[in-house]
Image (spheres, rainbow, N blue to C red):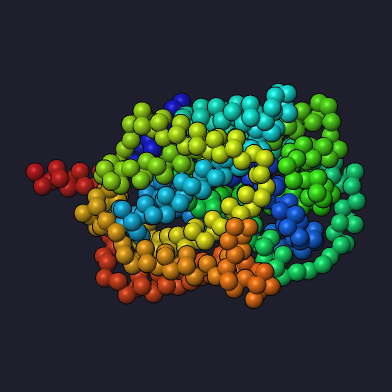
Amino acid sequence: MVESRSIDFIPDSERHGSLASQFTLWLSANLQITAIVTGALAVVLGGDVFWSLIALLIGQMVGGVVMALHGAQGPQLGLPQMISSRVQFGVYGAMIPIVLVCLMYVGFSASGTVLAGQAVAQLLNVDDAAGITIFAVIIVILTILGYRTIHFIGRIASIIGVAAFAFMFSTLFAHHDVGTLLANRHFSIASFLLSMSLSASWQIAFGPYVADYSRYLPRSTSSVGTFFAVGLGSVIGAHASMVFGVFAAALAGSQFAHHEVSFIVGLGSSGAVAALLYFSIAFGKVTVTTLNAYGSFMSMATIVSGFRGQRTMSTRHRLLYILAMVAASTALALIGRHSFLKEFTAFILFLLAFFTPWSAINLVDYYCFTKSRYDVPALTDPSGRYGRWNVMAITVYVVGVLVQMPFISTSFYTGPLVDDLGGTDISWILGLVVPAVLYYVCARASARIIPERLILPADVQELRKQAH
């Protein structure tokens, strides 16, 4: 029941799973309360219902393509996503984006734990702090069990999520005049692009770990099939959640902030039905919060193994990393549970500045140059093919971050050019395009030698035997 692999390569003899489990995993990871709240922000921050729905869909599709392209790498490489970043950044250089990825995991876990804790508290009739703590214990257990359990929970959560959302949408349409909400239109380019940013950032933020959950698939699995299974599951789930969030926020007005879970459940539900919805909300957060905890362990293991030259990690260290990361996110959830909505908004928007350049570099390198022809043993050797630091890639990454700064608009930082654009945040678009073009040009001009095929640890061992 307990997964034995961590950051090491998954050999063909241990590959398993199907594309159906990829779809259900990412569907369930997105049919959840945090995605509802993210969609609600489009209205809370000034947008109307009609144009917010369109903008969110466009952002989903753009971000979903980026996210699914990362997911398609898993079966081909059999490696965690951030380990493979050493190909672009170097064995030590890859730690720069990985540290930021760890912050992302902790932040998303904390925000999700706040909402799940509210649901658990309502379900068990305890206070929010107790609900948050109970939920955190469940996440620790599931994360320790690992990959197979995560996919199993994803299948169950997808069924519960579809049933819960079907009921909530039917109740919403039966008890409220949705047509009136759609008829109230006041287009604003700033609000439109903000809504796009919310959904695009939601999808792009999955990029640093999506391949972690497809790396056990057989290497013969179609890359196109993986792309659509992962992408459609994520986009369909996230958009359904965000659409519901838009309608909920439009109906709630000022009542939504700090009472997100209770208001959503209260839209036509009470008694036993409300209890079932609270359960579905809590269970819906299990999948994605476990993904975050599992991803944080993998990222921490990647950082430490880079300095130590390790390819594997002991069960003891694995447990310690999981406990440390879940404890950190739980502490943040307990401290910030009363100011969740405002801080979460700033968090997810500001994250784009650091993850879009990494995503652009990784995708351009994989699909335009290396095409899965990685030297796996060299990924743990600072003196090997990929070196300690890839100055070119790190420079492009830094440029990709800096070029966004004048255009970022969040509650704690606003770039100097935002006002000239009417308050519009276009930073994430520049963060994808500029580093992608720069890296492509620089990589074509570089003299690095790419292997003719994927080099596996077994290949190196065979060569050593032949040499002796």
Identify the residue at the far left of this view: 468
**Left or right: 93, with 133 as reference point:** left
**Left or right: 311, with 200 as reference point:** left
Q: Which image quarter: residue 289?
A: top right
Percent coordinates x, y for residue 436 in the rendering: 46, 69
Look at 84% across and 65% down and name the residue there.
185
Toward the viewer: 69 or 106?
106
Q: Is residue 455 above or below residue 50?
A: above
**Left or right: 375, with 331 as reference point:** left
Toward the viewer: 440 or 129?
129
Q: Which image quarter: residue 115?
A: top right
Q: Is residue 263 visible?
A: yes
Percent coordinates x, y for residue 353 in the rendering: 52, 61
Toward the viewer: 300 or 455?
300
Percent coordinates x, y for residue 348 in the rendering: 59, 53
Look at 78% across and 41% down and name the residue there.
264
The tally of labels here is: 0
Check the picture and name the quadrant holding the C terminus: top left
Look at 46% across and 46% down and name the residue there.
102
**Left or right: 344, with 181 as reference point:** left
Percent coordinates x, y for residue 256 in the rendering: 77, 45
Q: Is residue 143 above or below residue 207?
A: above
Q: Is residue 431 above or below residue 232?
A: below
